[in-house]
Image: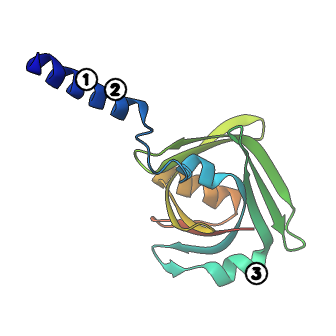
Amino acid sequence: MRKLSFYMLVFGMLAFTAGCDSDSGSDTPSDSDNFVGTWAVVGLSDASGDLSAGFAQGYNSVLITFGNDDSVSLAVDGVDPNPDQSYSGTASVNEATSSIVATLSVGGSPTPLSFGYDFTSDTSMTLTASSTTGLLLGVLFGTSYADPVVFTLAKI
C-alpha cells in the first residue's frame, strides 16, 4: 500500500508539473514579434568603416516595415534628384540561427535578401548582410560595399 501511495504521489506531482505552464518567459516576445513595426536605417558600415554620413547624404530615409503576417516593405526616400523606391514581399525569421530572409519583389522578380540580426535593445537592432545580399544592396543603392555590410536600425 505504501508503494502505491508513493507512486500516486509521484504521478500526482508529474501531472501537476505537466499541467503548469513551463514557459515562465511567455511574457517575453519572440524575435519574430520583435521585428513587427517600422524600422529606420540610422547607420551603415562595411569593411571600410562607417558609411553613415555618406548614406545620409543620398537618402532622406530608408524605412523597413515588418507586419504580423510575415509581410515586409522597404521604402527608400532618396534626396532629390535620386528617385524614391519601394519594394514589398515576405520575411522569414529563423530564431535558431538569428537570421532573417526578406524576399522582395524587385523589377517583378522575387529577390531574397539574407541577414543575420542582433537586437541590441527593444528599439534598436543590427542587420548583417550575407555576401550575396551585400552585392545586391550595392546595386540597389548604386554603390559597392565590402563585407561585412552592417545596417543599424531604430524602431520608430
In this picture, is 71 found above or below 153?
above
Determine the residue positioned at 66% across, 57% down: 139
* Residue type of the residue flagged with mark 1: Phe
* Residue type of the residue flagged with mark 3: Gln
Give the residue at mark 2. Answer: 15
In this picture, is 90 found above or below 130?
above
* Image location (x, y in percent) of residue 136: 60, 52
Q: Secondary structure at mark 3?
A: helix
Q: Nearer the viewer, mark 1 or mark 3?
A: 1
Give the residue at mark 3. Answer: 57
* Residue type of the residue flagged with mark 2: Ala
* Image location (x, y in percent) of residue 151: 58, 67
**Any part of residue 101 in sight:** yes
Which quarter of the figure has residue 45? bottom right
What separation in Å lies between label 2 and label 3 (alpha carbons)? Answer: 63 Å
* Image location (x, y in percent) of residue 20: 42, 36
Looking at this view, is 49 or 67 the one in front?
A: 67
- Mark sitting earlier along the chain (2/3): 2
Q: Residues within 10 Å of mark 3 (few under 14, many from 20)?
A: few
Which quarter of the figure has residue 14? top left
- Mark sitting earlier along the chain (1/3): 1
Determine the residue positioned at 58% across, 47% down: 32
Tag 1–tag 3 contact (CB < 8 Å):
no
- What label sits on residue 11 in the rendered view? 1
* Image location (x, y in percent) of residue 37: 73, 55
Determine the residue positioned at 82% across, 52% down: 86
